[in-house]
Image: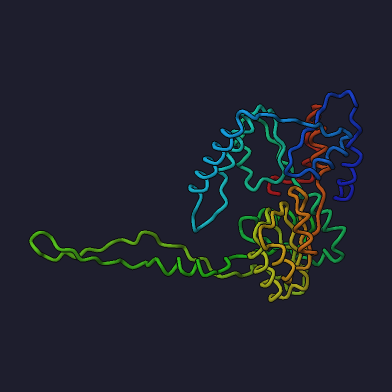
Amino acid sequence: MSLLAHIQDYNEIITIMEKNSGMILLAGNSHPSLAKLISEHLQVPLTDVLCYNKPCRQGNRSGNSAKCTREACLRSTNVFERSALPMKLVADMICKAGATRVVSLDLYRKEIQGFFGVPVENLRASSFLLHYICCNIPDYRNAVIVAKNPKVMHKATSFAEKLSVSIAVIHGEVKDDDTLEANESFSSSFDKKEIRNDAGISLTYEILPVKNVKIKPPLTVVGDVGGKIAILVDDVLDEAQSFVAAAQLLKQRGAYKIYVIVTHGLLYADAPALLEDSVIDRVIVTNTIPHEMQKLRCHKIETVDISLLISDAIRRIYNEESMAQLYQNSNLTD
């Protein structure tokens, strides 16, 4: 089945829910526009919720403040890496609240599903992103899928196989002042220290270095991108510095157009401005996270709507239907 036919099938699968079906849709305040789209697809209105817990308000604030402060202290570090451990706390809270099934979309680490004590449906946005490539990039047959780092090589490989194009990978890291200072602060040689005992005799001994920092090479491209469209793929776009540096490298290696395709567009701080001033031609993200304000600062950002996929998953779970069709054009590595 072609990607275009697969996307069209979603429109046919979504049927009008019966008014007396008993389904109730509740939405938080983090992404009302996505909730509204899902409601329209299911033909089920969003239910109003009134929460009133005045006596415990001050206690809740104090408790949340203490938790946030503790978490910030535990995670404060000069070397930041994404970790799935905080997600364990979120999973426990969701399960304790009474959830019997969870629907997610492109978890950054698939192992996160094991944190939940209930079944998890981790949907894939790859079909919608591939559909965008086929319909909106005219010469996509002359493209090369580029993994922004080796960690997303599996995702890039899946995209390249489905589009029948070549693949490349960005290796190394962007060097900054903090990294250079950290590398210089540690030495692989032994430090010597001299002390004197009670008899006044000088004793010299060697101290092992506390840590040897692994120094990654500067950014480089493994693969041929000369004269091709470079499609840079990743799971999350939070800070834009690494994407901009990778795009500059691809441009130097001969790529004549550069697209960035990710599932979740966080777009922190000055990320929109950096993307707007970069050599990147288009930035494609799904609407899992609201980014209307960021689009005002960067006109290169385009949104792929995945509300239809989530709506179909909700409908199938509610009607106790098979979820297999939602994964028929997806791999575990997507």
Quarter of image, res 60: top right
List the single residue furthest toward the left: 199
Q: Position of residue 250 (x, y in %)?
A: 69, 71
**127 versus 140 height, above or below:** above
Quarter of image, res 204: bottom left
Regarding residue 160, the answer to whether it shows in the image is no
Q: Nearer the viewer, residue 54 or 77?
A: 54
Q: Position of residue 304 (x, y in %)?
A: 81, 52
Q: Position of residue 322 (x, y in %)?
A: 79, 31
Number of on-image labels: 0
**14 versus 251 height, above or below:** above
**Residue ID at (90%, 26%):** 19
Q: Position of residue 245 (x, y in %)?
A: 65, 69
Would residue 154 appear left or right of 130 to someone viewing this image? left
Q: Nearer the viewer, residue 113 or 19?
A: 19
**Residue ID at (7%, 61%):** 199
